[in-house]
């Protein structure tokens, strides 16, 4: 029994080390790969090269643990250096997912999945099954991550406390990243893939929602859609990474029971993955899967429903838009839904163009150029083409949010002031200040305006001014794709380039 426990402990330590290496190197690689494919000059109104570079810089602001020597965000310093100590495993490192100092596993895994997908398409431990930090005590305090006095308790899922959604998303992240690393580091790619398979098997065998096992996350990242979408999502990414029929068979056979081909969805997010599942499944070549044609057509029907809803082409349910033309799902962090929709629209636009097809909606067919024009309009809104002329990508342009809801950014840098700032002292001396933040979280995509295009640049308005890693992750892929407007794509018309 003791030997078994020791092996489990060694396994978790291995996973932790692999995850830290994976996250840090993955972001560095993504930056290099994205920038390598981009032209240096831009002749249209927005400099997408600059926006992309800034968006990837954001992740350096979110680093936890000991920072590398080449850290470019100089107002950050080492933090959370004892994570996992209580549990006897090394959980130091990783990334804070938003403006607080907690490392939530599910949204962070989705961040990596989407960054990897962006590289696959346009860039030519494991990711942690553990969540580190106590959201309740963390939100009670307003401190720099370098000063944290709040609980760093780590939470995990296991056989008795399942978390199929976080296990599935982590498996998807590692499978997607294994594709990215395949040629650059085959050994590491194989390691990621092996762990992805293990995680998928674990999540499928011991089914359950992670917020039922770790109840403290219910107030921050509750899983509304459950875990079945993550299992389908993971299986699809494993199929893409391995080409093994067993994973495709899982997606096809569980399409009805898990809701993949029955849920008509109008959002895609860190929680709700069905639209992503439907998009990927609908792009599988039908001639290769003739015996599964009917099921794939059902997936495609739901994918088209999502896309047509974004384009306002369904007869009944469509995604709302603000007067300025921004997709609007809900008040809290609406930009995450804008960036994910823009990414899926862009992906599908390229697919339709390459296969010489059109999107069939209730209100008529839509060609690939029309879809891409709309996706671009959403990105341009983010960068400043909106009624308030604000860039919601922090650090881009001349007018961007100055009071981002971000603990580290809102308090004087640790390098400039090493004096300890207590739990409530941060609220009294920094959170309540009306002045702009002393540090700029370059590349952060904030929650964005309300349904009337109005934005309050106030630190206390976290629904509008807090940024999250998964907002920026999906935007990065679209920004990379936008560079092909001028230098690569002959099929893109001048209308798109100037829209």
Image (cartoon, rainbow, N blue to C red):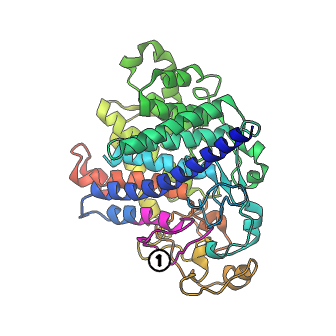
Q: Residues within 10 Å of mark 1 (few under 14, many from 20)?
A: few
Q: Is residue 75 magenta?
A: yes
Extreme residue toward the top, this view: 291
Q: Position of residue 349 (x, y in %)?
A: 37, 40
281 horizontally vs 451: left or right: left
Q: Is residue 123 visible?
A: yes
**Which one is nearer the viewer's eye here, 385 or 116?**
116
Q: Is residue 360 visible?
A: no
Q: Position of residue 490 (x, y in %)?
A: 21, 45
427 horizontally vs 201: left or right: right
Q: Check disc 1 and report its element: helix, strand or loop.
A: loop
Quarter of the N terminus within the rendering: top right
What is the count of numbered marks? 1
Extreme residue toward the front, this view: 3
Residue depicted at 50% across the width and 59% down the height: 324
Residue depicted at 36% across the width and 41% down the height: 186
Q: Toward which corner of the image does residue 91 lie, by quadrant? A: bottom right
User: Residue 334, relative to residue 365: is it above or below?
Assistant: below
**Which one is nearer the viewer's eye here, 333 or 386?**
333
Tell me the chief SS of the magenta region.
loop
**Which one is nearer the viewer's eye here, 2 or 151?**
2
Quarter of the C terminus within the rendering: bottom left
User: Residue 456, relative to residue 132: is it above or below?
Assistant: below
329 horizontally vs 71: left or right: right
Q: Position of residue 417 (x, y in %)?
A: 59, 87
Residue depicted at 24% across the width and 42% down the height: 491
| Residue carrying label 1 | 74
The stretch of residues the image draws in magenta is 54-80
User: Residue 192, relative to residue 379: is it above or below?
Assistant: above
Q: Position of residue 150 (x, y in %)?
A: 74, 69
User: Residue 333, relative to residue 163: is it above or below?
Assistant: below
């Amino acid at each position: 029994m003791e030997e078994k426990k020791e092996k489990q402990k060694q396994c978790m330590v291995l996973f932790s080390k692999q995850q830290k290496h994976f996250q840090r190197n993955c972001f560095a690689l993504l930056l290099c790969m994205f920038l390598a494919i981009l032209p240096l000059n831009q002749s249209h109104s927005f400099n997408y090269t600059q926006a992309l570079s800034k968006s990837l810089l954001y992740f350096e602001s979110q680093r936890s643990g000991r920072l590398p020597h080449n850290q470019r965000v100089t107002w950050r310093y080492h933090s959370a250096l004892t994570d996992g100590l209580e549990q006897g495993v090394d959980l130091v490192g990783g990334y804070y997912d938003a403006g607080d100092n907690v490392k939530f596993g599910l949204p962070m895994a989705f961040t990596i999945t989407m960054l990897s997908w962006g590289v696959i398409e346009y860039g030519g431990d494991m990711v942690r099954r553990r969540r580190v930090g106590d959201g309740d005590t963390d939100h009670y305090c307003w401190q720099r991550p370098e000063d944290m006095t709040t609980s760093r308790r780590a939470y995990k899922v296991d056989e008795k406390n399942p978390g199929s959604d976080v296990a599935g998303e982590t498996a998807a992240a590692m499978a997607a990243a294994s594709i990215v690393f395949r040629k650059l580091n085959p050994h590491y790619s194989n390691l990621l893939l092996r762990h992805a398979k293990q995680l998928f098997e674990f999540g499928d065998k011991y089914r359950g929602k992670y917020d039922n096992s770790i109840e403290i996350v219910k107030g921050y990242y509750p899983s509304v859609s459950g875990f079945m979408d993550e299992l389908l999502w993971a299986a699809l990414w494993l199929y893409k990474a391995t080409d093994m029929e067993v994973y495709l068979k899982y997606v096809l056979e569980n399409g009805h029971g898990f809701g993949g081909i029955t849920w008509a969805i109008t959002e895609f997010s860190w929680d709700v993955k069905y639209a992503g599942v439907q998009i990927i499944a609908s792009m599988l070549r039908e001639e290769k899967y003739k015996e599964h044609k009917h099921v794939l057509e059902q997936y495609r029907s739901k994918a088209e429903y999502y896309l047509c809803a974004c384009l306002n082409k369904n007869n009944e349910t469509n995604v709302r838009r603000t007067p300025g033309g921004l997709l609007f799902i809900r008040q809290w962090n609406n930009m995450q839904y804008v960036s994910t929709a823009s990414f899926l629209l862009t992906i599908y636009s390229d697919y339709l163009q390459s296969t010489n097809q059109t999107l069939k909606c209730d209100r008529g067919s839509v060609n690939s150029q029309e879809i891409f024009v709309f996706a671009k309009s959403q990105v341009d809104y983010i960068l400043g083409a909106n009624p308030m002329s604000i860039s919601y990508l922090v650090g881009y342009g001349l007018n961007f949010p100055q009071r981002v809801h971000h603990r580290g950014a809102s308090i004087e840098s640790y390098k400039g002031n090493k004096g300890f700032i207590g739990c409530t002292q941060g609220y009294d001396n920094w959170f309540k200040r009306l002045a702009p933040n002393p540090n700029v979280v370059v590349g952060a995509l904030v929650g964005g305006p309300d349904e009337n295009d109005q934005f309050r640049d106030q630190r206390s308005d976290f629904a509008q001014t807090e940024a999250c890693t998964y907002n920026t992750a999906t935007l990065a892929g679209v920004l990379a794709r936008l560079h092909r407007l001028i230098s690569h794509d002959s099929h893109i018309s001048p209308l798109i380039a100037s829209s």
